[in-house]
Amino acid sequence: MTSPPYDPGFDDGWIPPEEPPGVEYADYDGGEIPWAPAGASRPSEDPAVRSSRFASPLEALEVVYGYEAFRGDQAEIIDQVVSGGDAIVLMPTGGGKSLCYQIPALVREGTGLVVSPLIALMQDQVDALRANGVQAAALSSALSPSERAEVERAYVAGELDLLYVAPERLSGEATRALIARGSLSVIAIDEAHCVSQWGHDFRPDYLSLGDLGELFPGVPRVALTATATRETHREITERLRLPDARHFVASFDRPNIQYRIEAKADARRQLLRFVRSQPEGSAGIVYALSRKSVEQIATFLAGQGVDAIPYHAGLDPATRQANQARFLREDGVVVVATIAFGMGIDKPDVRFVAHVDLPKSVEGYYQETGRAGRDGEPSVAWMAYGLGDVVQQRRMIAQGEGDRAIQMRQQQHLDAMLALCETVSCRRQNLLAYFGQESGPCGNCDTCLEPPETWDGLVAAQKLMSTIVRLQRERGQSFGAGHLIDILRGKSTERMTRFRHDQLSTFGIGDDLSEQDWRSVIRQLLAGGLLVAQGEYNTLALSPASAGVLRGETPVLLRKDVIGRPSRADRPHKTTAADTLAEGDRDLFETLRAWRAEQAREQGVPAYIVFGDATLRALAEHRPATLDQLDGISGIGAKKREAYGEQVLRVIADASR
């Protein structure tokens, strides 16, 4: 297997390919990454050097995190790991996976070792843990030599509750020798789907993690991911050598996310309309396939008054880090990015994720859209999808370097993604079925809220296929969608005259449909495998399934695209995060947000590290007046009560006068 591309600033090296083959990536030099804040991963200098062991998981949950009860399978998973058993956990983004290894690390003796794929993800979790009084650190290339030495010393001395490392670093002998010098409480392998060579985020160094059980016998291991098909699930179990692990598969449903996909006409204008329809001050992520598209879309949105910034591997590290920091720490920022962005982003209040290019697989789509609404609040996953997306993705598969088996698997992934886009039934139902989960219609996706109109496309498909047949059999010619549509609509062009295609018997027989209608027909026929795109110029040809259409034996039910007319959900509505509160509490909520923003700026951390919106809403609603009353507010543990309690009470008292 060839070496993966490297880029400084994502992890100890590797980032997932984000563009077609041939794109150059910056070389990783193994040195320091200059943008890392000094001492960011250094162990705490707090006098209480290390969190004491807790008597029970529930005690750790209440004291450290400020929550009164576990959610879903968390309690059972944690009990399995605390008792020394292995576990494989499939839980959606925002479901609370991190607690499933953080709490066992606080209850069991030793240091919890967490394998995490990105520097941003490691640092985000370290910051959040330390804000809760947990002794956590990360070993990464973002550290200076002195900082790295201090982290290593603290680990060997047993002063750390949790230590984060990237798989690339952990595969090295020096790091493994260091780990062997300390005492481990638990080994957690986060983003475990990266072990799958058929998955959407394959990381070669994850394959070396299978021997951790032999290297550190008796230490419970837990593998966690937010997305995995049955096949990927099985591969995680085999490659990480977890035959005796208990398996916990939570529901993949994210009911707070509304899935919406619309036909692409003018993607940038459609995106702008969508962004403007979202609540005022919403943070969002827009995914595009290439770096060039990222730059163009960010510039366009910014020119239209949207606070939009680009993020991709081609930016210099300082700019990339500055843009990421703005997105994390400020409200209302929209980041336009390639798929390399996001897996390391723990921001809970992302209100929307938009795609202007078709994702390669349902797993990738689910992972990316799952970055919206981690806090459980209503959020939107929006996509504009068109004929060009289908053609481009099929061409990328055909021109890829993989063998036939790999290309067939990639085609299967794409077919599932196309089925999700073209469905006339509930999108959530289709999405969950892909992961083997049955459900009824959700009532909250676009196809449920505004059921698409369908029409019998058999005759239209036959007209198109007959044109293709006549060109190929009578003249040995093949053409792309644009010229075929011109023939069907009887359009007089220089090319039409030159090739004498105006003499074809099918010339003009499709003038009852608009050009956009024909593009919709072709897109849906390609998605359904009733046509294929071939060669460098994406000429259209019949597929084996076309014969049934030409004979009239195969029904062709098509969805009628509504292009250029805003849906009910797209109509602008100016709301804010405070709108769920009673009118008398909204001003206090905004005052608390301003105080939180000031605290975050002073500490150089994202605002949600201080408190999440849910905690601020609870403070605004209940208006506690004493430190004891703060104990009943979700999200305020002992450390945060000590750090912020008096200030919060003053803010509430001043605002209540």
Image: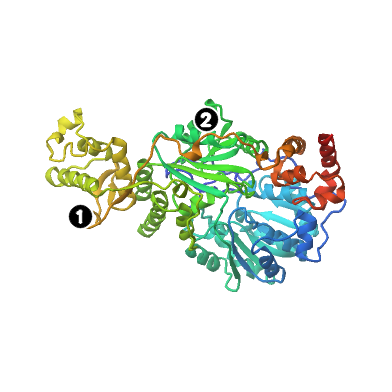
Residue 29 lies, with reference to residue 209, above or below; the image says above
**Residue 310 percent across, percent down from the top left:** 55, 34
Q: Secondary structure at mark 2?
A: helix
Q: Residues within 10 Å of mark 1 (few under 14, many from 20)?
A: few
In the rendered structure, which amino acid carries the disc numbered 2?
A: Leu
In the rendered structure, which amino acid carries the disc numbered 1?
A: Gly
**Residue 49 percent across, percent down from the top left:** 84, 54
- Which residue occupies the extreme front position in the image? 583
Q: In which quadrant of the rendered image does the C terminus lie?
A: top right
Q: Quadrant of residue 605?
A: top right
Q: Is residue 595 visible?
A: yes
Q: Secondary structure at mark 1?
A: loop
| Earlier-in-chain disc, 2 versus 1 | 2
| Direction from residue 511 to residue 203 in the image, left or right | right
Q: Which residue is located at x 56 percent, y 53 percent? A: 255
Image color mode: rainbow
Judge by depth and name the residue closer to the eye, 378 or 418: 378
**Number of the front mark, 2 or 1:** 1
**Residue 20 percent across, percent down from the top left:** 42, 44
**Residue 568 percent across, percent down from the top left:** 48, 39
Q: Which residue is mark 1?
A: 552
- Which residue occupies the extreme bottom position in the image? 244
Q: Which residue is mark 2?
A: 301
Q: Is residue 8 visible?
A: no
